[in-house]
Image (cartoon, rainbow, N blue to C red):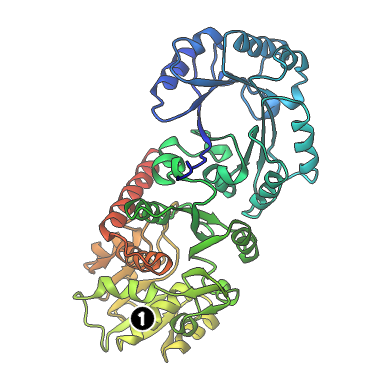
Amino acid sequence: MLLAKMIPSLCVTVTAPTTAELRKKRDAIRDADLVELRLDSVSDPDVAGALQDRQRAVIVTCRPTWEGGAFAGSEEERKRLLSEALAAGAEYVDIEARAGFDNVIAATAGKRIVLSAHDFDGMPDDLDARVRSLLSQGTEVVKLAVQTRKLSDCVRLLDIASRSRGNNLVLIGMGEHGLATRVLASRFGSKWTYAGGLSGVGQVTPESLVDEFRVRHVDRSTSLYGVVGSPVSHSVSPAMHNAAFRATNIDAVYLPLPAVDVDDFVEFAQAFDVRGASVTIPYKVALLERVGSASELATRIGAINTIRTTDNGWLGDNSDVSGFLQPLAGRLSLGGLRAALLGAGGAARAVAVALASQRARVTVHARQRQRAADVAALVDGSIGGWPPTPGSWDLLVNCTPVGMHPAAECSPLPPEYLRGGTVYDLVYNPQKTRLLRDAEMAGCPALGGLDMLVGQARQQFEWWTGVCPPVEVMREAAVRKLAEFSKARAES
């Protein structure tokens, strides 16, 4: 007999300027087990109005300004609102541990009470003691939310969870480094996880949690993959790989992993048993030194763009070479072609090897001449000045992150330097960068980085899982995510 997956509940936080709008937004939620009604967000807090005709369970919260909320009224008024919510039958009421509302808690003997504590400054040294104190209060649920500053802060929360097993704890890592606590809530023993529009504390939308990260299917046995880099907020790789996991019925989830350094990622990956990862700027070279072994190609390049776990530790590889060449097939004859590379990082190293394998003549242009020399030496290439002389190249490849979201209006070169042949920008977000727009205006054929991204991602997925993913599914997911980024930029 198959055991059911143990999946935490999903709580969606709702805010609004008025109680009427709060109720309207409450009823618009389509996929949630609970709705958190933030009375501190409304100008006319009305408990009866907020609870009227609700169709699902609610948590009533009225967070004061001193705990990161918006309620600036008196504590007596706040206590009255929360007591009214309990009397009106709210399934849960959130009360801050520092509030001292002991009589409100005692009125229900702790039942239906979420005792919460928030630390917006980081991970406190006395975290264990705080959790023990919260759990000793005898409330039905205890919620602890702390600001994460690095991935490995999640490891501390995981340790807390391992010593506090039960069904009444909710652990949240606020900020982008704490996303794992929301998606992998089952590993933390959390009773539920939060979604919503409070992006300032790291909440993601219900659609993102449910559709992209498939939180309804993630339990302790779900395999973990991700993209490690800094930054990774622009990445569409989670959308691509999670869509591929869904299409191939593989029990896995793929997260953005914004590591502050290599050690931060290593600590997180070991604690959470990361099965495989894409590696991006700036860790393609540094992580090569931390893997147990690497493919011959990755070793030659001196950089990796992916790792996977084996019985003998991590194995590194590089799918950038084939991913880079694939979009050029049928477009250009590379033999003898003059190729100018902008940048001298891990991506440039892979591109140099790829072009040299097709007998192109490689010149590396970077502001740091020694780094350019190191890349050029891989392929008996040349070192060029900065910026490249107009007309000195047949193919210009941007291997830098300049022009990447959110700095989408930046370009590595002024328009007057774009006199030559084809311009290939490895940046894929946005799909049409400032460099590509300038190239087209100058009459140069232009090629973006999306096809390379999809090609190398397909190869990574198959290398990790042994399953060939549907490429069109991955590409469509990437395009949808890029459209979301584009819309957000237009609205900002």
Query: Looking at the rendering, which quadrant does residue 392 occupy?
Result: bottom left
Amino acid type indicated by mark 1: Ala
In this rendering, position of residue 211 left or right of residue 187: left
In this rendering, position of residue 59 left or right of residue 379: right
Point out residue 343 in the picture as x, y percentages from the top left corner: 45, 73
Point out residue 448 in the picture as x, y percentages from the top left corner: 30, 63
In this rendering, position of residue 426 left or right of residue 152: left
In this rendering, position of residue 60 left or right of residue 355: right
186 over 31 or under it: above or below: below
In the picture, which quadrant includes the N terminus? top left
Residue 14, visible in the rendered structure: no
Q: Nearer the viewer, residue 440 or 87?
A: 87
397 over 275 or under it: above or below: below
The residue lying furthest to the left in this view is 330
- Mark 1 lies on a secondary structure that is helix
Residue 244, visible in the rendered structure: yes
Query: Looking at the rendering, which quadrant does residue 81 occupy?
Result: top right
319 over 59 or under it: above or below: below
Q: Which residue is mark 1?
A: 354
Q: Nearer the viewer, residue 87 or 179?
A: 87
Query: Looking at the rendering, which quadrant does residue 452 occupy?
Result: bottom left
